[in-house]
Each structure stands twice: as structure tokens, then as C-alpha cells.
Amino acid sequence: MNEDELKKILEAVIYASDEPMSLNRLIGLFPEETHPGREAIRVAISQLQEETADRSIELKEVGSGYRYQVRQNYAEWISKLWEERPARYSRASLETLALIAYRQPVTRAEIEEVRGVSVSSNIIKAFIERDWVKIVGHRDVPGKPALYATTKGFLDYFNLSNLEDLPSLAEIRDIDSINEKLELNLPGENTGMVVDEDHFESNTKDDLDEIPPEAETDELAEPING
């Protein structure tokens, strides 16, 4: 199999797939006797990415693999294909998701300690149902509270290849701006990624403690339109 044929096969498979294709899944497509090799597939993917550099579509690596997608510059035009207004999320939901993303793994009580108000169980339930958050273990304290962390589905939805692609806390002066920073107002839609707790504690604890708590308790448990 020559290089050009390999690129065409990968392009067709990634384009046709309804979910991101991981490198291992792409490798598994080829019989052992005609296997091009992991490095050859990586090179072919890199070339395909270069070929879309000046196009309105791109071959993007997200949390669970590679996918073809429209570039963000054209979101305004693509959104006209859908009549419904995209969902927006309550401040309570955004603060909860941000705390899970930046301090994971984290318990519900730890989220409530930072925010200063109780967290509706429906908010976390909604994130789990969307495959943005999952339980990755239990804190070794009385009651064994669940530890929450983001998933690869979270990375896929927000167009991130890994957690290092999250906007820095310095960029998020106002919690409401997360809608823009993480593009929560765009449509889109997979299993989990657990990060080292010490890494997030040392890098984000002080900044997150500065998030102002809400004056009221959480009442909005589901995404809202607005």
C-alpha cells in the first residue's frame, strides 16, 4: 500500500465515522499482513491535516481521536442550518462544570465549599447523562463521597485534545464568559479520563478559590435557553 492510498483510506474512514477515530481504531482497520505501521498512519494523518490547513474544514484531534469538522470561523453560517436556538447553561451549571474540569477529581462537598452554596444533584446528573462527567472513585473519608472527573466525551464536545487545552483561569475573569471560552452555545456531542489530583490542586486551587459564590442556592438543574 503506497502513501497516497493510505491517506485516502484514512480520509474516507474518518470522514464516514459518526464519532472520533482513535489511532488504535485506525490501526485495527488493517489486516496484519498489509499493516502500514503506526508511524506511517501518524504521518498520513499529519499530511491530511496539512492539506486542510487553508480549507473551511479541518482534521482535528480531540479527546477520543480524530474527526473532520467545520472550522470555528464558519460556525455562524453552519448554525443557520438548525432552527432551534442552541442551549445555554445556568451560572450554577457553569461554575460546577468549571470546578470539576479544573480541580478534578473533586467531590460534591468540595465544589460546594468553593461555591458557598449547595449543588443540585440534578446538575451533576445532567453532566453524567451527557457523558461530560463520571465518577472515578471515592474519597477515603467518612461517607466515601464520590469523586467526579471529566470524560473524553467532555473533551470531544468542547473541541479539546486534552485538558491542557482548557482556557487558563486568567482568561476566565467572569464565569459567564465560559459560554464563549468553551463555546457552550454551539451544538455538538462519547469514556473517561482521570487526571492527577495533585497536578490540579497545585495549579488551580488558589485561582478557583477566588470564584465568587452565588448569593442564592442552585435552582437551575438543566441547560436553559436564553
Image (spheres, helix red, strand yellow):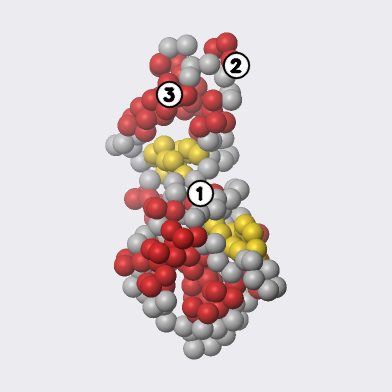
C-beta proximity under 8 Å, tags 1 and 2: no
Q: Nearer the viewer, mark 1 or mark 2?
A: 2
Q: Which of marks 1 and 2 is nearer the N terminus?
A: 2
Q: Is residue 3 above or below residue 150?
A: above
Q: What residue is disc 2 on?
A: 31
The image shows residue 85 at horizontal and vertical percentages of: 51, 64
Q: In this view, does 178 lie above or below 38?
A: below
Instruction: Identify the residue shown where x is 34% and y is 73%.
Output: 173
Instruction: Residue type at mark 3: give it.
Output: Glu
Q: Which of marks 1 and 3 is nearer the N terminus?
A: 3
Give the residue at x 29% y 37%: 54
Circle 1 crowding by C-alpha within 10 Å: few under 14, some 14–19, many from 20? many
Q: Which amino acid does label 2 sit on?
A: Pro
Q: Which of marks 2 and 3 is nearer the N terminus?
A: 2
Q: What residue is at 49 percent from the left and 51 percent from the top?
A: 155
How far across and how far down the image is residue 42, in percent?
Answer: 42, 27
Q: Badge 3 is on which residue?
A: 39
Instruction: Look at the numbered disc 3 and give the secondary structure of its residue.
Output: helix
Which label lies toward us, 1 or 3? 3
Q: Dot 1 corresponds to which residue?
A: 156
